[in-house]
Image (cartoon, coloured by chain):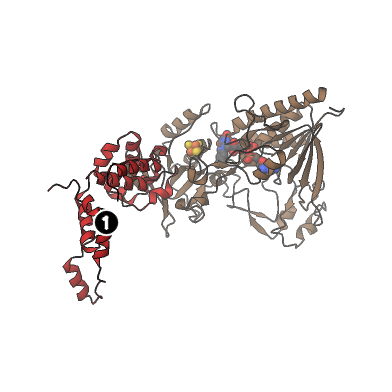
Chain colours: A red, B brown
């Protein structure tokens, strides 16, 4: 994985591929957005901030991490904008800067350790036994770990971490 | 040109074509008016009232339809299509196919006894499928010409009509007729079609009975319509108490290749919202819009009246989805009010889609026949939008009305008169030299 300035350049170019400047603020993305229903996240706000040149602010904002990447907005957008892709690119840029919310860091390290994004607690395993459910398949984390380390993912998720 | 005074062909019998034909005819020239449907009138005949004056649409149109049909210089060719156009030294040689009505036009008196006896009921195209017609029919009572037509796709050949027609007008052996016309100029006024709202899956049109289009609402509101002017919703015939209008359906939407504004839907939605308020005093009406485009004379005032005098609610935002309650058939509209950032989920009894204007079927074929290009959407292209908007790059062929792009009736009529003038100028110049 490239993590240096070339990566920043590439991602910055990728931002315009999502055509945020085409947005005319109709709000169709936002009214269909499941994340917007429960949070202050508004895809439409992200796009107008981009149009106003507020990329810096976006990278530092927790809003870009609230998208659940369901792609509903992309389906309904009458202007061919790709809000989901835009959000993903912004997150990648933010990560390169070391701006990563704690939960996402946690998920990253969980994948490195267990091969799964979600650490299954002991209590859950016991519960399955109690209900007579078969044991969960064992996951061999090693190939996943090797793959992620080969692209420096382990270092990426530690960037900017306050120790 | 030769001795004989050249004739002019008008293709399309909507308000634009009718106006052009009347203007050409009143200058002493012969006009052939070719309309592919059984009657002239176009979309204006389907409207209840017209914005911004709320005049009765039929009351303005019907006299014009009668005038054009009775004008001594007009030859009306309905149920007919232009099949070929050849450029000749002195104008054009045009082949017109007259489809068989299976009713002799010169014998039928329009009494309608046949339709009374016809046992076959078919959804009426004129009423947008909300009412029925018979297999032998006139599309609407004011049809011009008032001549019946047998729809052979639905006719069961029982011949009851033949038995009851006192004039003996029924002729099952009628054949298509090919006519050759010599004309000096052509005016194209083939109009528009409304956007097929089925394409927008998230609005559920075609699946949810209480989601209707603006044109369907025109028929519902009309006193001469399938519901006799009683405003009731399709699923259960109940009077709606909460009605929503959704704007820009199939317009300003790149997904369907229609990035343009259809120009009339803001105004026709406001018009119909006011009509609903006038008919049903207890109705709540909300219009969900992106921008209200009221560009014409008296239009902005009309919009303001709707809000201030009639209490119609305007909410800025584009609806992402409509959900139907399977039991009540009520509709939940999901929308962000983009002025407050609030996400609303409101319930309505009926939702009206303000469908945009698109080119009519068959426009590509006609474009080839005429040698006049259409743009990327399928609207005919003018020679120069600034200086010769009614002319085309093909000499002697002129344009008028919505065949050029979305517009309202006043603009269509103005263009029709302009095109008529240009066409007459053109033939006179060549005829005199
Ligand atoms: C729901 C709705 C409400 C509206 N309300 C209003 C209003 O209140 N006020 C207002 O000003 N405007 C209104 N409009 C707009 C108005 O309908 C149009 O401006 C007007 O009808 C355009 O007239 P036209 O003659 O250009 O086209 P049309 O009315 O479409 O007529 C075209 C005719 O050409 C015929 N034709 C098509 N192709 C061929 C062919 N190849 N050969 C032969 N004939 C052909 C068609 O059958 C048709 O009869 C409304 C539109 C809609 C959809
Ligand atoms: S006239 Fe109004 S509803 Fe129609 S496309 Fe334009 S903005 Fe949308």
Q: In this view, does B29 lie to the left or right of B317?
A: right
Q: How many labels does the image show?
A: 1
Q: Residue at x 30, y 37 (%)?
A: A55
Residue B49 seen: no
From this viewpoint, which residue is outermost toward the front? A150
Q: Where is residue B126 in the image (x, y as percent from the top left)?
A: 63, 48
Q: In this view, does B281 lie to the left or right of B18?
A: left
Q: Where is residue A44 in the image (x, y as percent from the top left)?
A: 35, 41
**Letter of the chain that mark 1 sits on in the rendering:** A
Nearest the eye: A139 or B205: A139
Q: Is residue B94 left or right of residue B335?
A: right
For disc 1, does the CB lie below 8 Å from ligand 2? no
Question: In the rendered image, which residue does mark 1 sit on?
Answer: A150
Q: Position of residue B354 (x, y in %)?
A: 50, 43
Q: Which residue is drawn at 25% across and 46% down?
A: A95
Quarter assignment of residue B96: top right
From this viewpoint, which residue is outermost toward the bottom? A132
Quarter assignment of residue A99: top left
Q: Residue at x 69, y 59 (%)?
A: B154
Quarter assignment of residue A138: bottom left
Ligand 1: quadrant of the figure: top right
Q: Where is residue B136 in the image (x, y as percent from the top left)?
A: 72, 54
Q: Which residue is drawn at 35% across and 53% down?
A: A70
Residue B140 seen: yes
Query: Counting other residues with Cα less than 10 Å from the Cα at mark 1, is it few (<14), some (14-19), or many (20 or more)?
Result: few
Nearest the eye: B280 or B212: B212
From this viewpoint, which residue is outermost toward the right? B3
Q: What element carries label 1?
A: helix
User: Vertically, is B310 above or below A135?
Assistant: above
């Amino acid at each position: 994985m490239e993590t240096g300035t070339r990566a920043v350049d590439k991602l910055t170019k990728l931002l315009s591929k999502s055509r945020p400047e085409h947005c005319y603020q109709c709000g169709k993305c936002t009214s269909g957005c499941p994340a917007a229903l429960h949070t202050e996240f508004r895809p439409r706000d992200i796009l107008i901030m981009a149009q106003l040149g507020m990329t810096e602010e976006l990278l530092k904002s927790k809003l870009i991490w609230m998208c659940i990447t369901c792609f509903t907005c992309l389906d309904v957008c009458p202007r061919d904008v790709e809000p989901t892709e835009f959000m993903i690119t912004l997150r990648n840029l933010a990560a390169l800067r070391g701006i990563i919310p704690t939960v996402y860091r946690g998920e990253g390290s969980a994948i490195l350790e267990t091969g799964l994004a979600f650490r299954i607690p002991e209590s859950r395993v016991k519960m399955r036994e109690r209900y007579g459910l078969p044991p969960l398949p064992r996951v061999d984390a090693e190939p996943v770990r090797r793959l992620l380390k080969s692209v420096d993912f382990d270092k990426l998720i530690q960037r900017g971490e306050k120790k | 040109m030769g001795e004989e005074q050249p004739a002019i062909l008008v293709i399309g019998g909507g308000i634009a074509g009718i106006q052009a034909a009347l203007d050409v005819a009143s200058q002493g020239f012969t006009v052939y008016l070719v309309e592919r449907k059984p009657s002239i009138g176009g979309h204006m005949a389907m409207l209840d009232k017209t914005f911004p004056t709320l005049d009765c649409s039929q009351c303005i149109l019907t006299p014009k339809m009668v005038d054009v049909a009775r004008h001594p210089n007009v030859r009306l060719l309905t149920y007919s299509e232009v099949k070929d156009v050849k450029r000749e030294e002195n104008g054009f040689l045009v082949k017109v196919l007259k489809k068989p009505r299976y009713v002799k036009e010169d014998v039928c008196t329009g009494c309608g006894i046949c339709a009374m006896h016809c046992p076959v009921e078919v959804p009426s195209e004129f009423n947008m499928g909300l009412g029925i017609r018979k297999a032998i029919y006139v599309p609407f009572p004011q049809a011009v010409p008032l001549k019946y037509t047998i729809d052979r796709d639905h006719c069961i050949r029982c011949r009851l009509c033949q038995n009851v027609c006192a004039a003996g007008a029924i002729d099952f052996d009628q054949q298509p007729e090919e006519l050759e016309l010599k004309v000096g100029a052509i005016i194209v006024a083939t109009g528009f079609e409304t956007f097929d709202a089925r394409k927008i899956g998230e609005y559920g049109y075609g699946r949810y009975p209480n989601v209707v289009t603006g044109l369907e609402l025109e028929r519902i509101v009309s006193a001469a319509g399938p519901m006799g002017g009683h405003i009731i919703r399709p699923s259960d015939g109940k009077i709606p108490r909460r009605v929503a209008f959704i704007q820009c359906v199939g317009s300003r939407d790149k997904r369907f290749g229609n990035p343009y504004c259809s120009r009339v839907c803001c105004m026709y939605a406001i018009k119909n919202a006011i009509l609903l308020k006038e008919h049903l005093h207890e109705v709540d009406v909300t219009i969900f819009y992106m921008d209200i485009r009221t560009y014409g004379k008296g239009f902005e005032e009309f919009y303001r009246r709707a809000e201030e005098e009639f209490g119609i609610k305007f909410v800025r935002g584009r609806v992402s989805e409509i959900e139907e309650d399977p039991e009540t058939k009520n509709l939940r509209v999901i929308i962000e009010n983009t002025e407050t950032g609030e996400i609303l989920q409101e319930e309505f009894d009926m939702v009206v889609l303000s469908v945009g204007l698109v080119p009519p079927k068959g426009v590509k074929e006609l474009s080839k026949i005429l040698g006049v290009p259409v743009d990327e959407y399928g609207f005919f292209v003018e020679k120069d939008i600034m200086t010769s908007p009614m002319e085309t790059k093909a000499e002697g062929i002129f344009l008028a009305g919505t065949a050029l792009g979305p517009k309202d009736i006043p603009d269509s009529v103005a263009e029709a008169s302009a095109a008529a003038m240009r066409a007459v100028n053109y033939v006179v110049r060549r005829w005199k030299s």
